[in-house]
Every structure is written in C-alpha cells, then in structure tokens.
Amino acid sequence: MTAIERPRVTLIIPVRNEAAHIRACLDSVRKQSYPTERLEILVVDGASTDVTPALVQDAASVDPRVRLLENPSRTMPTGLNLGIREAAGDLIGVVSGHSVLGPDYVERAVDAIETTQAWSVGGRIVRRTHGPMHRAIAIATASPVGVGDSSHNYATEAGWVETVFPGFWRRQTFDRVGSFDPAMVANEDNELSYRIRRAGGGIWYDPAITVEYVPRSTIGGLFHQYRRYAMGKVRVFRKHGGGLRWRHLVPAAWLAFLVSGGILAAFSTVIALVWGTAGAAYLLAILVASVRLAEDGVAWWRVAAALVTLHLAYGIGTWQGVLTWRG
C-alpha cells in the first residue's frame, strides 16, 4: 500500500497544564514512521494555566499537522468529543499528554486494526518512572495483584481484551455507538469500550504497539486516581446495568469486611478470630507478593504500600460511588 493509499489518521492529545511533558509527547508523535501527509495532530487544551498552549503553538509553527483547540469546559470527555468532531482522519487515536509513543506506534496500530477488523486497538504500557516510590507504584499498577485480570496493563501476548490504553478507533465506531459520554468524569474510555463490546465490536491488544506513560508518582496521587476510577466504574454500571467484573467488587467487599468485622469483633470471639485471621492472611499475601515483585533499588515495603493503596482506594471509591448514587 502506497503512502497515499494509507488511511488518514488523527491523533487527539487532551491536555491541561502539561508543560513538563508536552514537548516530549509532541516530538514522539511528529516523528512517527507513518506517512507524514496522512497524519493529523490535534491538541485539545483544557484551559491550561501554565505555558502548555505556547509550547503547542511553537510546535504548530514548524509543523502544520499540529493544531491547537480550546476546551473551556476542561473535562476529558468533552475535550475528546471536540477533537473527534474536528478530526479529518478515517482512524482516530487518543494520546495522553504525559506519554511518549513508540516510533512505529501509529503504523502498528493501523496494521492491527486493519488485520483484525477490530473496532478499537491499543498496546503495551511502558511506565517511565523516577525514584523508588514512583517505580514501586509502576510495579503495582502493572501486576495482577494490584489490578486483577485487567490484562491490558501487563499482558505479553496479543489478544482480545475489555479495553485498551490510550485507544485507537475506526471513525465508524463512533458513528455506531456514539462518542464519549460527557457525564463520565472518569472512566470515559472504559464506558466507551463497554458500548463497543455490547454492540458486538472487538477490542484488540497488541504488545508490539508501545506507549511510554508516566504514572502517578506519589501514594496520595495513586489513591486519588484509583478512587476516581472506582467511582467511574459505578457510574458505568448505573448507566448500563453491566460492565462489572469480580476485580471491581473484591476491594469493596474486602473493605466492608474489615470495617464491619472490626466492629463486630468487639462482641464475638469467633468473629474476632475470623477477622484477625483473614487480616493476617491478607498482609501475608501482600508481603509475599511485594517481595517477589520488588526490583533492585525498590524496597518491598514500597511495593506493599502501593498495592494496599490500590486496594483501599478502589474499595473506598466503589462505596463512595454507591453512596452518592443518583437515579
């Protein structure tokens, strides 16, 4: 297939205050091996208060493929929908502002979507970190112990999955199932993936498609992120009456057991024994997993802290979503 015959691709980069990362991100997008004239780059800025827009304009001044759009609402789904409306591509991908694409990311994504006839494709997340705690968080979020059977976070073989990051779709996919739901302030990509699967579409994961991503660097940031993810998952269930798997419910069930068991243990020796035994078993499992997952320069206790944070944050977020249920 000649360059002119290749499908036109639009990459949408939603950003807000990404001055620290946007240069590297845009450089990786502009240097793709895909034919230059078949690639469009739309940066959707959510009212940044730093120099992000100026840096994007600098890139646009030397590369006409780059265009800056304004998203005054600042929300992710609204910004993505703005990019989709403005996109000229037959295929549309989303790129995180604090990520770096592999040089053949677009080429491989196009090949995968054409070969598999998937409605959406995505690839392997290579987590870029600095410092031992940052690395520990990356380890936890790339492990089944931390994120369950969410295989697109760690799989080494290609296959069909529930969702992908950051996402690459046929334009017809949005015509069939609609664009991103503006009410989804978190998990907007996951909710779209659910609609794709429900409509009979497939989502393909290929680890040869690589994207470097900077995860949260602090325990507090990790907690906030996964609490919001869990609240977003409850919203998906509230909207569709489906989309939940065991991994979404286990943290909430475990948290409920810890709280209720801790209270009831004061009134029953049997309950106190069961509660204490279960808690000790959990801590032992975390200890063993953390020791096995720890790497040179990353202490096991840091990994353990990240794993426990993931579980607690998702459990709290799930209950928060349930308790603030509307409709």
Image (cartoon, rainbow, N blue to C red):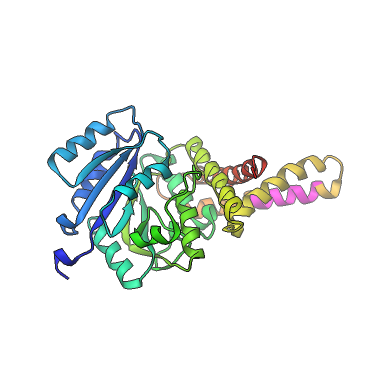
Say if 180 sits above or below 70 in the image: below
Judge whether residue 285 is colored magenta.
Answer: no
> Is residue 285 something one can see in this rendering?
no
- Residue 222 lies, in percent from the top left, at 49, 40
Q: Does residue 276 appear left or right of residue 118 in this picture?
A: right
- Please identify the quadrant where the C terminus is shown: top right
Q: Quadrant of residue 298?
A: top left
Q: Could you say which is closer to the camera, residue 136 or residue 207?
A: 207
Q: Residue at x 37, y 58 (%)?
A: 124
The residue range painted magenta reads 272-282
Q: Could you say which is closer to the camera, residue 72 or residue 20?
A: 72
Q: Does residue 55 appear left or right of residue 50 in this picture?
A: left
Say if 23 sits above or below 191 in the image: above
Q: Residue at x 63, y 40 (%)?
A: 320
- Residue 311 lies, in percent from the top left, at 58, 47
Q: Quadrant of residue 156?
A: bottom left
Q: Residue at x 37, y 46 (%)?
A: 80
> Is residue 201 something one can see in this rendering?
yes
Q: Could you say which is closer to the camera, residue 236 or residue 141?
A: 236
Say if 20 sits above or below 290 in the image: above
Q: Residue at x 24, y 62 (%)?
A: 107
